[in-house]
Image (cartoon, helix red, strand yellow):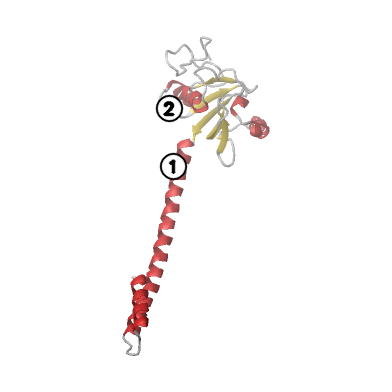
Amino acid sequence: IKDDGTGTGGADNDTPTLAVTSPAVTEGTDNYAVFTVSLSNASTTDGVFLVEPSGRIATANAAAHRIFGWAPGELVGQHIEVLVPSHHRGAHAAQRALFAQAPQARSMADAREVRGLRKDGTEVVVECVLAPAGGEGRVLVNVRDLTERHLHQERLRASQRLEAIGRLAGGIAHDFNNLLAVIINCTGFLEKGDALGVEARQDLADIRDSAR
């Protein structure tokens, strides 16, 4: 990987434009295509890392820096563990060891979604896919920020809860109206009686009016 020492490959903007010449990412392979396109495409929303066997980040695209809240080029040379919450680092180290034993393209966790750590200490839910980058133990990591997806899902769940409450309230109101209709009808029948006194008729009228 050729770089000008700034971690951004000499680009004028925040998008690394690196020339990949290492045999670890071989030209003509799918990994090479994904890596070079993702690094040079400023509009991509997926973060892409090339990680050394030591765990050090060899390079990362602009989206990777944005997702984890680092300034352009700051992630280069950092250990990948800086992006993992402290309470998950033990499991992450075990996952890295398993991948090194049998490197093949796969998601990082069975559930696909994992927690990442931003530079400011906040956590972000991401989807990680790993792929071997040649035969030297390097790893390509594709990271997708799921924040918007989770917000959309939460809004959808909230909408569904409100809809369910609305249906329940509508059902209760319907049943209650049926009961009130019975009360109104009964007071009407009672009012037709000739033996009712004035006070009783007034009571029935009050009941009927309250039920309406």
At x 44%, y 42%, the residue is 152
The foreground one among 4 and 154 is 154
Q: Position of residue 61 (x, y in %)?
A: 49, 22
Number of numbered discs on residues: 2
Image quarter of residue 113: top right
Identify residue for label 1.
152
Q: Is residue 136 above or below residue 126?
A: above
Dot 1 or dot 2, earlier in sequence: 2
Mark 2 nearby-residue class (10 Å; few <14, some 14–19, many ≥20): some
The foreground one among 140 and 174 is 174
Mark 1 nearby-residue class (10 Å; few <14, some 14–19, many ≥20): few
Does 22 sit left or right of 63 as displayed?
A: right
Q: Is residue 111 above or below residue 190?
A: above
SS category of the residue bearing label 1? helix
Identify residue for label 2.
44
Asked whether residue 168 is in view, the answer is yes
The amino acid marked with disc number 2 is Thr
| Quarter the C terminus occupies | bottom left
At x 55%, y 23%, the residue is 50
At x 35%, y 84%, the residue is 190
Q: Position of residue 6 (x, y in %)?
A: 52, 11
Image quarter of residue 139: top right
From mark 1 to mark 2, how far is it between C-alphas?
Answer: 20 Å
Q: Position of residue 93 (x, y in %)?
A: 67, 31
At x 59%, y 17%, the residue is 77
The amino acid marked with disc number 1 is His
The foreground one among 39 and 92 is 92
Q: Position of residue 125 (x, y in %)?
A: 53, 36
Asked whether residue 181 is in view, the answer is no
Q: Is residue 70 above or below residue 196?
A: above
Q: Which mark is residue 81?
A: none
